[in-house]
Amino acid sequence: MRRYEVPRLAFINKLDRMGADPWKVLNQARSKLRHHSAAVQVPIGLEENFQGLIDLVQLKAYYFHGSSGEKVVAEEIPADMDVIVAEKRRELIEMVSEVDDKLAEAFLNDDPISSVDLEEAVCRATIARKFVPVFMGSAFKNKGVQPLLDGVLSYLPCPIEVSNYALDQTKNEEKVMLPGTPDGPLVALAFKLEEGRFGQLTYLRVYEGVIRKGDFIVNINTGKKIKVPRLVRMHSDEMEDIQEAHAGQIVAVFGVDCASGDTFTNGSVKYTMTSMSVPEPVMSLAVQPVSKDSGGQFSKALNRFQREDPTFRVGLDAESGQTIISGMGELHLDIYVERIRREYKVDAIVGKPRVNFRETITQHAEFDYLHKKQSGGQGQYGRVCGYVEPLPPGSPIKFEFENMIVGQAVPSNFIPAIEKGFKEAANSGSLIGHPVENIRIVLTDGASHAVDSSELAFKLAAIYAFRQCYSAARPVILEPIMLVELKVPTEFQGTVAGDINKRKGVIVGNDQDGDDSIITANVPLKNMFGYSTMLRSMTQGKGEFTMEYKEHSPVSQDVQMQLVSTHKAGKAE
């Protein structure tokens, strides 16, 4: 919530349970989560004597009657609770005064503070993300739920009180502020997909403009124009058909084929709410269903997950014929395997995790290859000459092919076949069979035969030419490096840092945040397997970490030799 700048309320639940102590929880939220918070309610009785709540802002007592607490009765505050109410209200005013100047002025001048003043001050401080109001109750008995929902209306921002930014795709993803009014062009984000009875149900959050039933909207990510066939407002699992929805509302539409994270507009602007660049997956698993009969459900599940999550990919391993799923890490893929079991009742066998290595070259190398094959009838003849070289660092493209042949040594209709051959050859390098990237191939000369030359001959010539010059270009293996951010209590800092060094990680930052140390490190992904369990045991369960893909970078010489020999042994088997 800090990262995405989300204003928030807190709710302390289960006050009717044994040992309920809301004040202890509030103090822990302040010390552990560093919330600047105070209670806006005081419970009337605790554990089995929990009867209702006193609102410190309005100074009213609320009791909840009826089988599911639906009758809210407001009464005067019980006389025996005046002292605690006065004390807790003063604490609330003090806490809000620290972050709200208007209330601080009234507080310091000892002016009487009305309910309206206090409510407005809490609202301002919450929206500015400087204060967290704390509500209480027992959700199971429906006690305190209505005041919490009232609190959402009173204290959390309405759509025009928060800044939402879109990314303008015509200006290299430049940030654009969305005012959130119904008058502007439509901008809506598909943030959740659900398999409903009538096909895919897409939840949209409208950030600006109006969406109407029967309108044409454009999916910016795919460029497709679609009609809105049916627009519904969701009340948990009940639907209510509506004709239109305005900025700030959440609606669902049927029959719109899209992925999670796609942005829709009315076509007049090219804005997206999330970045279009999707990181490359860094880890793969082989999966297959246990029983042959469940293949249909299995592929249905994988198709749906791919639509829901652009970082989840499914492919087929050409050598072993296994289905390979790829994603952003161990936990990411574990969750999808678990969802296949739970939602589609398909048991899957999971292979060992594989890291997605890449290969690249480090120097210029020449090739000159003649592919000649003579059999009865038309033979095969194709000659290609040129060189390969690494692309400059930071280049946006991974593979570049350039034809610099002067004249017609190779007829121009064969050039696409040569490019295709090189592309195909670059799909698996000869070190460990992983794709080769950051490579530029330049064709300078060649030769053809009037009868025997064909597209196939030149494609094969290109594949063999690539293999011939690849080892001369000093190839290296690249491995995914992850940016790992750890948050651990300071007393465990030494142990954790030592462990990161053991995993060949490079610590790039170390900050202090209260009692915690925040360590930032770049660690090779293959050394991060099973890390969450290790981190928990090193820090008594108090440490946490997030990791995201940073880049592919060359492995050390000893690791490269080890990987190559493992690959050769696997191939021999």
Image: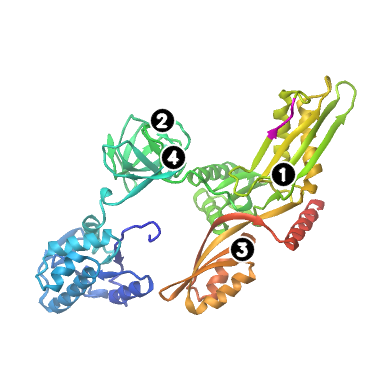
Amino acid type assigned to the residue bearing label 1 in the image: Glu
Per the image, is 513 magenta? no
Give the crowd class for mark 4: few <14, some 14-19, many >=20 residues within 10 Å: few
Element class at badge 2: strand
Q: Say which mark, if any, is on residue 529.
A: 3
- The residue type indicated by label 3 comes to Phe
How far apart marks 3 and 4 lie (CA) works out to 39 Å
Q: How many neighbours does mark 3 have within 10 angstroms: few (below 14), some (14-19), or many (20 or more)? A: few
The picture places residue 438, in percent across and down from the top left corner, at: 66, 46
Task: Report x, y in % for residue 517.
Answer: 47, 73
Q: Is residue 83 visible?
A: yes
Q: Which dot, 2 or 1, sits closer to the camera?
A: 1
Q: Is residue 143 above or below residue 292?
A: below
* Pair 1/3: label in front: 1
- The span from disc 2 to disc 1 (Cα, nearest Å) is 45 Å
Mark 2, residue position? 226
Estimate the spatial distance between the alpha carbons at disc 1 and disc 4, rounded to whole Å: 32 Å
3 or 4: tag closer to the N-terminus = 4
For label 1, the SS is: strand
Query: Where 272 sits versus 32, above or below?
Result: above
Span shown in magenta: 402-406
Locate residue 13, reporting x and y percent.
Answer: 30, 67
Element class at badge 4: helix
Sequence order check, earlier mark of 2 and 1: 2
Where disc 3 sits, the SS reads loop
Q: Earlier in the sequence, mark 2 or mark 4?
A: 4
Give residue 128's quadrant in the image.
bottom left
